Structures are given as structure tokens and as C-alpha cells.
Image (cartoon, rainbow, N blue to C red):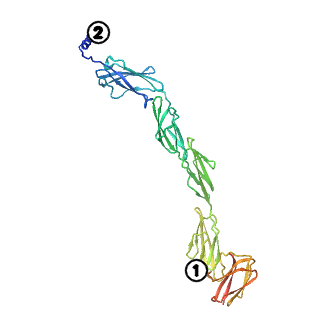
Amino acid sequence: MKKKLRLVSAAFVCILLSLGVSAQTVDAGIHSIDSPAPPDDCESNDVFVTVETQANTPLTSVTINWRVNGQVQTPVNWSGFINSSSTSPQPIFVGTFNFNPGDELLVWTTNPNGGNDDFSSNDSMRYEIPIFQKANLPARMLLCDGGSLIIDTEVTFARHTWNTGASSSAITVTSAGQYRVTTEDVVTGCEERYTVFVAAENPVRLPSGPLEGCDGDDVNLSTNLNRGTFNWSTGESSNTIDVQSSGQYWVEVTDTSGSCTSSDTVDVEFLFPVTADFTGSIGYLTVAFHNQSQNATDFFWNFGDNATSQDLSPSRRFATDGTYTVTLIASNNCFSDTAVKEFTVDRQNSTFVGENIDSEGSFSLYPNPTVSTLNVDVTAGDKENFTAEILDLGGRIVKTFNLGNVSQNQTITFELADLDSGVYLFRLKADTKVIGIKKIVRK
């Protein structure tokens, strides 16, 4: 019965053709293999194809078959609508396979609209996975502090396009960032895209110095890093150490990848207990203090007359004669000590402070007391540029005599008639040294 129907159908088709009426046809074929395919999807594992029909009737269903290297894969039964003499509006997903370069992919169609295909020339299409050179770039690279990196695709027969604008296979980078490159194989046209993230090394850092420590305590030296290989100048290998003595300490750290090494240095100074001490030279109402403290960096003086100072070795001119209790507090950032001494200032019985005395020179003067004339016998060796000064008891110069060169054992006469009656000091100097200071009385 079926054969008879086919004969009738065939006869009917012949009648239609003889009458000039077009017979309805059915077709399904592979228009293109869209993936894997150049340029972007040469190594894609997903298989997509575009189906076409050359028939004068729409295609509503078809079986898409495929095999890789002769091994048949699971077919896809597609249904939808493709107008006559048209292609599928978008690629059709066929399946996934872990392709290798050189694999052969064959895709073909059967059962268009559930029946026979009137056009067999477009039923199948073959594609060979291309073989081309690929880059072996790491996803992440470490840039050492102050250094540079070379990123090299090592792909020779390809065009390169870097996001830096470079077109060579290798670039040199000196800063962290994301570096992207596209390679296009000159033979197959296949493109590959790579991204390398360059991270900057975090170099080791020690606290900024110099650091101070107190004698008897520890100073902790901690780095900013927790991982890596640590090598200290002390021989220790942890990321933090304690030190007990003054000196310069350094640490060298190699990161966990072993590719970067950085170092840093810090000075440590230990402070020791303070000893406060001082002396003073009295000159009439002035005392010149000489600081003899040890291990101190800061000083506070209380002169006993409501005046203070923070100088190293100050001088103090007191307002009146008397005995003053002077206190010195010497300290550093760890320790302090106090010294207390008494000083009596007496304008009648004091000598000057801070004079550069010439131990080889001397002189004598007469008459003393005097009315108007003062004779001075000098025994001073070979000296030059002699100067004689008359001072009041407050230390003020009231009269100066420039004597020039004076021979040894020479007697010099001074006229003091213009001085008021009272007690004065006579000071004889040669160059920068003082021959001596003596008290004189003008009647």
C-alpha cells in the first residue's frame, strides 16, 4: 500500500512538473562551523554551527550530527523555523569537546523536517583544529622594588598588540599594573588574548630612626612584613627582634617566591643613667657655670633668685651680694639626676670669671692706694699688643690704655687723676691672654 502511494506521489510530481508547477522541496545543510574557528575561537571547546536550507519550503526540524577524529558524538535534534533559502538566525549549540590542535571535526545534517533531504551537497562540513604557537605567560608576576620585568610571549610568527601600544613579542615594565596582549598567528589567523597582572613588591621597612632605648631595657625592631626569609645583622631570622645595645642594625628579606630581596637599616642608641654635676667661676656678681654632667641631653638650671635657664653652661649675673643655692637637673629621655651647690658673690673679694690667664707673665703696681699716678713693673717675657684696663667692681671697663709692645722688666706709669675716688680693678693683657688682675684704690 505504501509503495502504491509513493508511485502516485511520484506520478503527481511528474504531472506538476509537466504542467510547469514547482514541486515542494526539503533541505538542511551546514552553512558554517562558527566555533571553533578563526580568529577568536580557534581553541574553543564549544561547537556552534549555522544551519541553512536551499529548499523552497521552511525548515522546522533537523538532526545535527558530529564526530571528532572519527568518534561519533551525541547528536542534537533541533527544532525551530528557518525560512526557505535562508540560514538560522543565530548559531546553534551542538556540544562540547576538549579539542587539541590537529583534531578533525565533522558536522552533518539528517532528517530535515523528519524526512529525506532533496539536496545532499551541503549536508556536511569539516574543520581541523589549527596548530599554532601559543604563549606560556603567567597570570601574575612580581616587580621587585626599584627593578624591572620582561614580559615575553616567546611567540615568533605572530602579530602582537599590547595595551601599552607595543607590537613586539616582549616588553619591559617598571611599574605595577595589568598588561594585556593579543597575538595573531600569521598562518592560521588564530588570535589569543593574555593578561598578566604585575604586582609591586612590598619592600621591607624598619621603624624610622634613630631609635632610643633605656639602659636595662630592650628595643624592639619589627619589620612591616610577616612572610619571607629574614636575615638580620645579628644572625636572627624572625621578622622581629629585640636588641640591648647601641649600634646600626639591618635586615634583608627575600620574598616567598624567592625573586625579590630588599633591605633596610636603623640606628639604635641606648641612653644611660645621668650624673648631674657642675662647677662655677665667680667674678663679682657673675657666676659662670661649667656643666660637668654625664649622659645628659637636657638641662634645667635654677639659680636661686627666681631665674632659670636651659643652656648647657650658662652664666648668671646676680643683682646683689649674697649666697645663692643653684640647682641643676640633668636628664635624657630615660633618666635624670639633680645637683645642688651654693655660690657666694662678693664684689669686694672676687676675681674675674673666664679669663685666659698667662701663667708665664706677672706684674706689680705701686703706690697703692694712689692719688693720681700708678706705676706698673711688668715681667712678662716677649709679649706683644699690651692693653691695660681699669674696671669698676661691677666688671665694667672705665678706662683703657693701649700700650703696644712692652719690654720685659719695663715700668709703665699710668695717670689716674681723672678717676673718681674708690676701689677699682687693674687688668693687664697681652694679645688675648691676661697677665693678671689686681685691686687698686684711688684716694
Image quadrant where one finds the C terminus: bottom right
Q: Is residue 369 visible?
A: no
N-terminal label among 1 and 2 = 2
Q: How many marks?
A: 2
For label 2, the SS is: helix
Please name whichever residue, 248 or 2, is drawn nearer the observer in this view of the structure.
2
Q: Where residue 375 sits in the image (x, y, percent)? A: 71, 86
Q: Where residue 154 sits in the image (x, y, percent)? A: 53, 34
Quadrant in which residue 361 is drawn: bottom right
Check disc 1 and give the amino acid type. Ala
Question: Contact (CB < 8 A) between labels 1 and 2?
Answer: no
Residue 319: numbered disc: 1
Quadrant in which residue 24 is drawn: top left
In this rendering, would 226 be left or right of 412? Answer: left
- Mark 2, residue position: 3
Q: Is residue 298 above or below residue 264?
A: below
Q: Is residue 222 above or below residue 100?
A: below
